[in-house]
Image: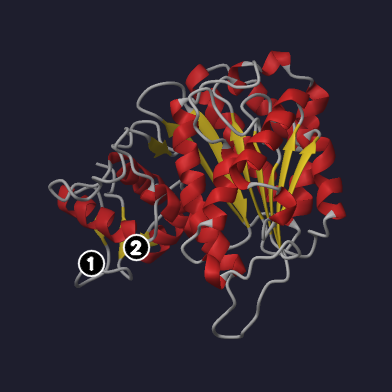
Amino acid sequence: MGVLWPLEPATAAKHRLYQRYLDAWWPILLQTSQRSGYTRPRVTLLDAFAGPGRYEGGEPGSPVFILDRLLHHTAVDRMRLSPQRVHLVFIEKDRARHEHLLSELTDQFGKLSDLPVRVEVRRGEAGRDSLPVLTELGAWGHPILGIFDSWGSVNVPLEVTRRIACNRSSEVITTFGPNWFSRREELNADILDAVFGGRGYWAPAADEARPDERWRAWLGTYRSALRRAGFGYQLQFRLVPRTGQHLYLVFGTGSEAGLKAMKEAMWKVDDRDGENFQDPRTRGAEAVGQLDIFQVAGACDPELLELVTQRLSLGNATVETIGQWLLTETSRWMPTHALKAARQMRQDGSIVVQSAGKLTSKSLVSLPAAA
């Protein structure tokens, strides 16, 4: 691959997701609390596979749009930006791409040392250099968002994500390229040990022979690795563009607020181009897209109905409990979707309401008894 390459449809959709998420993430972490007056002393964003900063068609790469949207955020006047307080770290391994990224950032924003935030553009390897750079910049003890967005092999050791997970108010986003799950034989087993935490954790996924189940097995394995690393909440999903190859992402956070913010970002991504986010738990249902859900004839998305059925197959639950399960265990569904799904499923006869009275979040529901 040369210095620049074409922007894939899935990458463009992923960038829209990042932009929406960061639009919410920056003010949450940088604005002074109205209740307590507390201001975080430092916030760090790490983009560990930064790339050259531009695509063949002229589209901005992640370092360019991340910095641009921060500097021009609608709430920037309340964020108290300073080079001591806000650090953006971009790591790129390839020499030519690193030089191109520096040039792109300087051309767009001028002398980086004059900006109201600290921008570090380093040439290095994500797995080897992320922790030393974060240590050098005094990031530990303060919020960190680590973006490990490799198009090829995911070779970031679990120790890196574990250090970030143990850091207060910190999160990671990891991307798996479209062909990652079909190239296992090309990867060094020692690298997989480092990424997933040991052979016993990833060997079952490697043994999965069914092509359509392989990505689910590997994605679930990585999600479990993030859980062991210390992230209390994890999302896993497949980003499906209208054209081109799929992309796979796993998000780890210790905060339910962070979980909701990522899901809200998904729902805000404009799907006029046809992309959607699919949950690995579903097999029989395809998501129909995001903007039209619950808007056409009041119908629910088939993926949501399948997921609620899966939860009820484990036993009876209140609608509220189902909603919490949707939040923490599914890729994009929110607690508010549980009651809407339960109403349609009751009407269809696919659930039974065990509680008397009106269907509410406190109602106990179950699957119908087998004939």
Residue type at tag 1: Leu
Q: Which residue is mark 1?
A: 359
Quick one: 251 or 228, which is closer to the camera? 251
Which of the image's four quarters has the C terminus? top left
Find residue 319 and name its label. Answer: 2
Q: Foreground: 198 or 265?
A: 265
| Disc 2 residue crowd, few under 14, some 14–19, many 20+, Cα 10 Å | many
User: Amino acid type of disc 2?
Assistant: Val
- Using the image, tell me which numbered label, if any, was put on residue 165: none
The local secondary structure at tag 2 comes to helix
**Colour convention:** secondary structure
Assess whether mark 2 and mark 1 are in contact (beta carbons under 8 angstroms).
yes
Depth order, front residue of 81/315: 81
Coordinates of residue 348 in the picture (x, y in percent): 17, 47
Task: Return the x and y of residue 245 as percentages of the image width and height.
Answer: 46, 22
| Quadrant showing the N terminus | top right
Percent of width and height locating residue 109:
62, 47
